[in-house]
Amino acid sequence: MATCAKAAKAGLLSAGLLAAGLPVLLAADRPAAAQSFDCGKARTATEKAICDSPPLGFLDSDMARTYEEARHRAGPAGERHVLDSQRAWLKSRDRCGGKADCLIGSYRARLRQIGQMEKIFPGWGGKYETWSGLDITITPRGADYHVQLDGAGATYTCGSQGSGKADSAGTLDVTVGATTVTFAAMGSGILLPDDLDQPSDFAACGAQAPGVGGYYRRLE
């Protein structure tokens, strides 16, 4: 624990990391859709795109948290590898410029890579949220899982329940009525299909609701 605390402090205060442009603020310190840096200081097309897009800001925030967790798990022997791979990814990410679709794909690929590299995904059970505030709670039920989607806004209410079966490939097949949706493990979070239709058996939130697909970060 002392080693992790020391590494976390070094990661947050190191001028070298800040100069490299590495995201070092923890997602838990910010609102769900906030990015990991000060948008008042955004200069590049990539930084401005992240600040202009709540889904991208959400991904950037969770990337900071996931990156710090990967460094802690890697320990002194593997921390340099995590740092170098993050710097390489940042260069690749920035080649997207301000193209939101390219940036979303880059963040998702990196979250998946970190998750596989450092075995961050703790298992399906837990609570997850997406950038718009929709929540998914996954509860173990014997060999299977109970899955619940919740969310509410000024003009919509979401709520559905289903059952899930996990496989060894890092996916969870969730069935609600006649609809089956595949969740994929990504970093410490989960990814739902972007083209997930609603209203459907899986989600009937109304026309004013945000999309239910995309990335959900783990809360607990």
Image (spheres, rainbow, N blue to C red):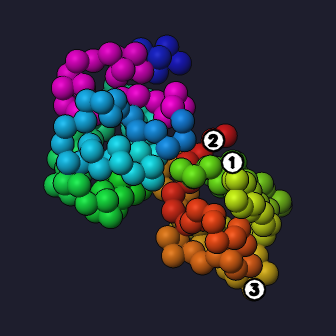
Cα distance, mark 3 to mark 2? 29 Å
Q: Are circles 2 and 1 on residues that touch, CB within 8 Å?
A: yes
Vertical arrangement, residue 7 with respect to residue 193, above or below: above
Residue 158: x and y in percent read 74, 62
Above/below status of 33 relative to 212: above
**Amino acid at dot 1:** Lys
Residue positioned 39% across, 51% down in the render? 53
Element on which disc 1 rests: strand
- Residue on which disc 3 sits: 178
> Horizontally, is 201 left or right of 86 in the view?
right
Instruction: Identify the image quadrant of the C terminus.
Output: top right
Q: Which amino acid does label 3 sit on?
A: Ala
Which comes sooner in the sequence, label 3 or label 2? 3
Query: In the rendered structure, which segment of residues is drawn in magenta?
Result: 7-30
Q: Quadrant of residue 163?
A: bottom right
Chain-order first, disc 1 or disc 3? 1
For residue 194: magenta? no
Q: Residue 101: give x, y in percent of width and height.
A: 32, 64
Identity, as a three-letter code, of the amino acid under mark 2: Leu
Question: Which of the labelled discs sits on residue 219, or is there none?
Answer: 2
Could you say which quadrant of the image residue 150 lies in? bottom right
| Residue, disc 1 | 127
Q: Is residue 66 left or right of residue 138?
A: left
Q: What element carries label 2?
A: loop
Answer few, some or many: residues within 10 Å of disc 3's Cα (few below 14, many 20 plus, some between 14 and 19): few
